[in-house]
Image (spheres, grey):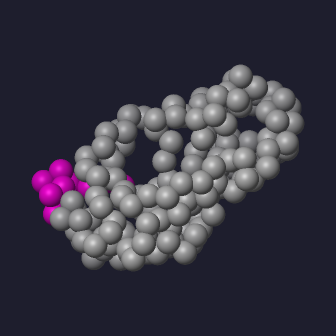
Amino acid sequence: MAALVDRLRPLAKLHWIPVEKLHVTTKFIGQWPEDRLEELKRALRTVKVASPVDVSIRRIGWLPNPHSARVLYAGVEASETLTALAAVTESIVVAAGVAAEPRIYRPHVTLARTRKTVPLDALKRALAEIEPADIGHYTTSSFSLYLSASGTYTKLEEFSLLP
């Protein structure tokens, strides 16, 4: 992903997400009381899956669409292991009091954002030449809980996924 972002960054004046902040969200928790943080961590420590989680980046796209581009994202294949992780995480945190997510899980990595119209022709041409196999794949056996505040991500704890 770092190589891809480095290649694309010079092609458009977007707010590019720093590589160290790129992530796949399995469950957005939202506001959570600080005095219940340990309870949430205990719940997340129980998240286990049968095998390491496969993460494959398969496409690059625009939200809401290429004609009204506001977010450039990398689409993540919803592998069986990643979907299982998202489902287990969802059920465990919902039981702890987090609101359920009504939408279907669609994993992605936000690469860049813009609030204004900027020239995107060079970037769109470069994206058209990228083959899905060129984007990336990794396997993980852990996940992390992050605090997101004012555009800053702070890792609160990393959890092992394997029993």
User: Quick one: 64 or 83, which is closer to the camera?
Assistant: 83
Q: Quadrant of the C terminus?
A: bottom left
Is 37 contained in the magenta span? yes
User: Quick one: 67 or 128, which is closer to the camera?
Assistant: 128
Q: Quadrant of residue 48?
A: bottom left
Is 155 contained in the magenta span? no
**Residue occupying the point 72% across, 47% down:** 134
Rendered view: 105 above or below 91: above
Q: Quadrant of the N terminus?
A: top right
Q: Is residue 77 left or right of residue 20?
A: right
Image spot of residue 119 (x, y percent): 81, 27
Q: Is residue 126 left or right of residue 17?
A: right
Q: Can residue 97 be seen from the camera position used here?
A: no
Q: Main secondary structure of the magenta part?
A: helix
Image spot of residue 39 (x, y percent): 16, 63
**Residue occupying the point 37% across, 39% down:** 153
Which residues are drawn in magenta?
A: 30-39
Q: Quadrant of residue 26?
A: bottom left
Image spot of residue 116 (x, y percent): 69, 30
Q: Quadrant of residue 127?
A: top right
User: Quick one: 100 or 83, which is closer to the camera?
Assistant: 83
**Residue occupying the point 44% across, 66% down:** 52
